[in-house]
Image: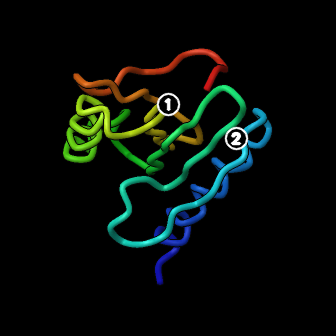
Amino acid sequence: MTDNSHAERSLPFEVTRLLETAGYQSVRIAGSRRPFDLIAWNRENTLFLVVRRARKPGVTAYPDIVHRLATQVSRRSIPGVVQFWVYQSNTWIRYRILPGGAVPLTGGDL
């Protein structure tokens, strides 16, 4: 197993720590055909998260995943907010998935 695959697997655990700090509880979703990596919730929100590492800026490396998620959002088949988190250059870049695609999230709000 390469170091990169180990680093990729550790990303959901890092996100879990960030979510817990923000008052969320979460569960990691396992399996090769999973639509999300994590589901997180608090009293106000339920988040469905995809977490990836990228060398290219933002979600440009993952157009198929973004398209699939945007299609699910447009069909209203997910009972919460869908987010795509990309770890790049030691920084998390967060996006909300909407019916038309991905929109960057700014500020500290999840």
Percent across and percent down for residue 32 are: 36, 71
Looking at the image, which is closer to me, 56 or 105? 105
Q: Is 62 situated left or right of 19 in this image?
A: left
In terms of image quadrants, where is residue 18? top right
Nearer-N-terminus badge (1/2): 2
Q: Residue at label 1?
A: 94
Give the label on residue 39, or none: none
- Res 19 label: 2
Mark 2, other Cα within 10 Å: few <14 / some 14–19 / many ≥20: some
The kind of residue tagged 1 is Arg
Determine whether 83 is above or below 3 in the image. Answer: above
Q: In the shown orientation, is residue 6 left or right of residue 20? A: left
**Callouts 1 and 2 close, C-beta under 8 Å:** no
Q: Residue 68 falls in which quadrant of the image?
A: top left
Per the image, label 1 sits on a secondary structure element best described as strand
Residue at 44% x, 37% y is 79
Which secondary structure, mark 2? Answer: helix
Q: Quadrant of the C terminus?
A: top right
